[in-house]
Image (tube, rainbow, N blue to C red):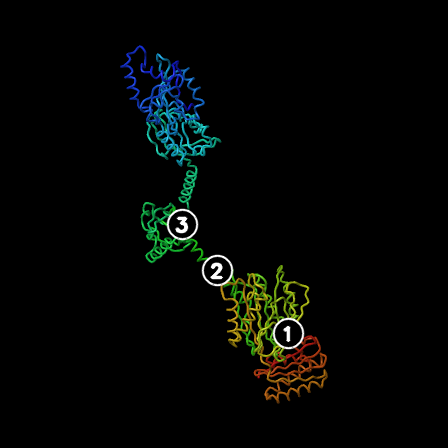
Amino acid sequence: MSDTITSGSTDGAGPAGQAHRLSGIPSRASEPGAAEDRFRGLLEAAPDAMVIVDGTGIIRLVNAQTETLFGYRREELLGHPVELLIPGRFRAHHAAHRDGYATTRQVRPMGAGLELHGLRKDGTEFPVEISLSPLETADGLLVSAAVRDVSERKAAEERFRALLEAAPDAMVIVDDTGIIRLVNAQTEALFGYRRDELLGRPVDLLVPERFQANHGRHRDGYITNRQVRPMGAGLELHGLRKDGTEFPVEISLSPLETADGLLVSAAVRDVSERKAAEARINELAALVESSQDAILAKTLDGRITYWNAAAQRLYGYSAEEAIGRHVSMLASPERKDEVVMLLERLRQGEKVEHFETLRLTSTGAVLDVDVTLWPTRDTSGTVIGASAIIRDISDRKRAEAELTGLYRQQKHIALTLQRSLMGTPPAIPGLAAASRYRPATQGAGVGGDWFDLVPLGAGRVGVLIGDVMGRGLEAASVMGQLRSAAHALAKTGMQPRQLMQALDSVVADLNVPDQLVTCCYLIIASDAGSLTLCSAGHLPTLVAAPGDSACRLLTPVNAPLGVGGILYQQSSADIPPGATLVLYTDGLIETPGSDIEDEIDKLTTALDDAFTRTDALAAAADHVLAALLPDTEGHDDDVTLLLAQVPAAPLDSARTELPATASSVPAGRAFMGETLAAWGCPQHTDDARLLVSEILTNAVQHAQGPLVLHLRRTVTELAVEISDLSPHLPQPRLAAQDEESGRGLILVDTLADSWGVRPDEHGKTTWFTLRL
């Protein structure tokens, strides 16, 4: 396009003479005065600047509007080249355009699509529109140029384009034939086309192919109606990108009446995300309606605003009956304050999860429900309401109650079984003891712990403690069998290592795969101030002597029972009268992630603290449990703790050694009589001498010497022991009438309060006691 004011060419003379001859315009044949006046009058009355030039581009005539528009006086323009009014950058091409117009000589209307500029006297440029008309005169061709300043219109157009570019939506402006005339940057971004790929193309380019057949009809119908159609008018519309992908859109249409005819402005908005969100919302709404849990929404003052089908099934109220009413209609009178409390927590933005309570139905029935509440917020984060999910847990509550009752019943049965299998250790005169047993709080509470006190006679006591690995009825069953076997074996008076060897065989015979048992057996000999101990993988025994801190008894630790092929070892230790032995199972000290040595140290510290507070064993046992197991419901293994205090030393003791000859029998009787007389116990002399005579006679006949006669007296009894070097144990039997022997042990069994035989490392010891 040309940015010039063009004119035709003439054969006129120089500027001055030509101006003089112009007084006869428009024709030599016309009436000179009147015609010229009329022409000049029309020229001055024209609304636009009028510039008339000859074929050489010399200005011949201008009107007052030209002076005003360009800032020149008339005499400064007449006779000067028209390029005076053209910006310098366009003057080089202006002559060619002027010559071209002289050849065509066509009327060019105002606003013919050319981008033209004028130049004022002050050097400023401004946009113009120029209408050209050829004038045939006697002096040759003149060209009349009507020049219009379009600065304001161009500024308005720029503002319009700026607004168009600033629009948040894609803007597409088409003419009444559907040709795209204007688009903005958002259109390029949305559809993927460059601007030059859209301008001048049919708008159908942006419509999916399946809709194009009807698009022309819809466009023609809109041109007929010419109504503004707002965004989101309920139509399902789609756009087509350059890459062939379709997407949902909303379109607002507005008619624009222009000088060039009707234009239609279309604001196009991509609603893909909103459609996806609506789809998700619809899915959620469907889920909420199909939920088996009651779901409702309410305002912060408790008014129900939503009520799904499950809520109707649960409470019996329809949505019409429930919406608008206060949620307290679902609570019994005594729970109205609970509703107020929950609403207040929601106002504070708190979420309430799995709140179990009671609610009423429309018929007044009471339901156990689980309620989860959470606050709903607006876009600024302010709490504006609440939603609730309510689940009927009446069946679960009934089942839980039944299970709780059944669990308690089963636990009672299990504990009764365990205590029956564990048994109750007998009270042993002179031996103070305190025990504590706590079943596991997990499961049925059945475990494999046991302990036992076994009176061995003649001032000796056997102490047993064991732990069958694992929990449950199987462990308890194994424990019961082992306890019975251990008690029976201990009653024979066998040594601790022998008992462990025997129990190892018992565990193997139980045929329980991978079953391991820890066990500890010790024998207290109070008269000798010593004990003998054997441990099969059990935790160390602690001893707390009066005035000293608790410490561990040093003893070999053998493998647990059930390993097999183990030769068990035992050890002996001196222990003062009044010392307390502490035996326990791993449930007392073992906790996940702890070091067992550290836990034993804690137990030792707790014992020291307990014995500084009290001398009572029961109180000390309670203190230890409270220190190591503060949470009475937090242990998952059964716990056993046994405190046994070594009896005081005998009041008196006497000992003599005799050969294995017949003379030892009267010598033994005499020693017995003299000793009892010295102790002030003459009333028991006859029975004691008779029993000693029978046992010594049996030893002389069947055993090897030397024979040791050992007497001990306590406040309550007289204990007598006869030791020999024979491993053969005497067996009571009923003698025939014609036999002279075989009645001695029967006599001992009849006269003694208790008696027995125990093997030792060198032979055996036969003993009896008489109550004083």
For disc 1, the marked residue is 532
Which quarter of the rendered picture does the C terminus lie within? bottom right
Q: Between marks 3 and 1, how big is the CA–CA gap? A: 68 Å
Establish if 214 lies above or below 743: above
**Quarter of the figure with residue 112:** top left
Circle nearer the N terminus (1, 2): 2
Which mark is in front, 1 or 2? 1
Q: Amino acid at mark 3?
A: Ile
Q: Amino acid at mark 1?
A: Thr
**Residue sitting at x 31%, y 14%:** 24
Establish if 253 lies above or below 730: above
Q: Is residue 186 left or right of residue 431?
A: left
Q: Between marks 2 and 3, how big is the CA–CA gap? A: 31 Å
User: What x and y, as percent, mark residue 581?
Assistant: 58, 74
**Quarter of the figure with residue 483:** bottom right
- Tag 2: Cα neighbours inside 10 Å, few (<14), some, or many (≥20)? some
Tag on residue 407?
2
Q: Between marks 1 and 2, how big is the CA–CA gap? A: 43 Å
Establish if 161 lies above or below 557: above
User: What x and y, as percent, mark residue 510?
Assistant: 62, 62
Establish if 572 lies above or below 204: below
